[in-house]
Amino acid sequence: MTVIAVGGWHHETNTFAPTLATYEAFTRDGGRPALCRGEDMLAALEGFNLPAAGFIDTALAQGHEVRPLLWCEATPSAAVTRDAYERISAMLIEDLENLMASDRPPQALYLDLHGAMVAEHLDDGEGEFLSRVRGVVGDAMPLVASLDLHANVTAAMVDRADVLVAYRTYPHVDRRETGERAAGVMDALLAGGRKPDKAFRQVPFLIPLTWQCTMVEPMASVYDALAEGEVGPGVLSASVLAGFPLTDIPDCGPSVVAYGRDAEAAEELADRLSMAILEREEAFDGKFYSPDEAVEYAISRGGEGSGPIILADTQDNPGAGGNADTVGILDALVRHGAKGAVLGVMCDAEVAAAAHAAGEGAEITASLGAKSGQPGHTPLTGNYRVERLGDGRFTARGPMYDGFRMRLGPMALLNLDDVRIAVASAKQQAADKEMFRHLGVEPAEVRILALKSSVHFRNDFTDVAQEILVVEAPGPSIADPAKLPFKRLRPGLRIKPKGKPLGE
């Protein structure tokens, strides 16, 4: 029996977003577990679609002993504050040092990380943390880390972990499965005794989030190539990472990591997978609709088939640093008379409280949205009818959030000129139908459905969608990387598919 220490720390940093991630952001229970330590961590993660949960269950089934450290996550936002980073890092290191000094010290370490964390004082949050961890456990201890598909992988991360294992789906329905695969890799490392050879490639162009979806081309074929290549002789593990293109650091962008029982196998597979992305570069440059264009199209087509036309409000996606409070698409829906349309989930605790105070059936005059103070954004003021109220406490049932206990605070379904808006008190990406059912709306029965999400909604809404349009409405989660004011990217990187390399 091997003793394996397990910990986790997640943050996806949009350096262009308006709100920093404070320490308190990691302690909130927004559906996923809040910051937890020691034995409390095991109970908190049980049943969740999270890598650490999958790793723990698999490692125990393999006969290993698991020693929990700390696990936490904050909603994507701007950089992690120096205070939050140093406090959480110190807590994890303290817990690890205590285990190392115990009568049963760990012989291996697994970390559930994101891979795109930037702090106020550090570009490479995970690379620095892994360096600190190695300072405690030494270079000999097997160390496996799982990463989000959107990780901006750095050379430091590759160097300090023995194997990096990334998600293979976007929407991320395979998070638990990723932890299970990481446990399999760890078991192989422990049995083999020899550390694997590594190969690392950075792809020279940024991929917009909306075209990173693995359910559709071109990314579907890239992951098919990964599945085929990983079974090759001499290969231990491989990952394709699409990168998080909203991060202004030199290592931003897609990458490939491959691990082999010999260097040649790892290098050959890394070359093949990076070429699979490069060969499809032009296909990653998809269409974005303006709000007016999307709404007019949806009105003209809505009702022609079964299910809604879905408008993805990608630039206000709280899963990528948005605050779910912009009103660009909502304004277009109202102006164009898109009767029966539903938009969600808008985050406005002030308006939700006013709706609860007034009660169902009442009419309130409210200024909805634009509460996060983003420059140039204004609320949509009007007389809203309160159709339905909810406490924001429900369990998600879609493939990605399945089992997540949502805690969105007081919620309300408001009606403005026959356009309905699902409003919550805490921001959460609209990626599960239960967010609407909680307020009495069945998504399949809506003609036009606007979702504050980029891609994750596809896991639970594609089956009812008549058509999906990606809408470039105003918001901080910029969909087209070419429109971002980058200052720190590495020379030669193309900020969009087929774009001009930086420095030329």
Image: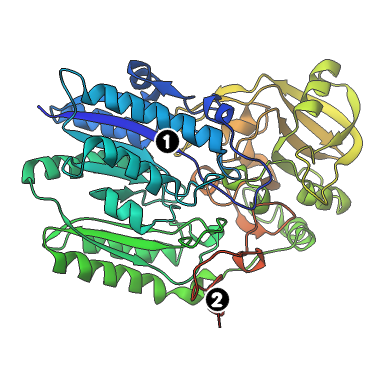
Q: Position of residue 458 (x, y in %)?
A: 52, 49
Relative placement, left or right, of 384 versus 2 is: right
Q: In this view of the protein, which residue sits in the foreground, 270 or 468?
A: 270
Rendered image: mark on residue 9: 1
Label 2 near label 1: C-beta < 8 Å?
A: no
For numbered disc 2, what is the local secondary structure? loop
- Location of the N terminus (image quadrant): top left
Tell me if I can see residue 176 in this picture.
no
Residue at position x 90%, y 25% from top? 363
* Nearer to the camera, 182 or 447: 182
What is the spatial separation of the Cα atoms under label 1 and label 2, in whole angstroms?
32 Å
* Amino acid residing under circle 1: Trp
Residue 423 image position (x, y, % from top left): 73, 32
- Nearer to the camera, 320 or 227: 320
Q: Residue furthest left?
A: 192
Residue 117: x, y in percent? Answer: 48, 46
| Quadrant of the image occupied by residue 58 | top left
* Quadrant assignment for the C terminus: bottom right
Quick check: 87 left or right of 302?
left
How packed mark 1 is, by other alpha carbons closer than 10 Å (few <14, some 14-19, many 20 or more), is many
Q: Which residue is mark 2?
A: 502
Q: Residue at x 53, y 44 (%)?
A: 119
Residue visible at 21% across and 57% down in the picture: 259
* Amino acid type of the residue that numbered disc 2 sits on in the rendered structure: Leu
Is residue 143 visible to the viewer in this orientation of the structure?
yes
At which x and y percent is residue 253? 47, 62
Relative to 311, 37 lies left or right = left
Q: Residues within 10 Å of mark 2 (few under 14, many from 20)?
A: few
Say above or below: 131 vs 22: below
Rendered position, 496 above or below 64? below
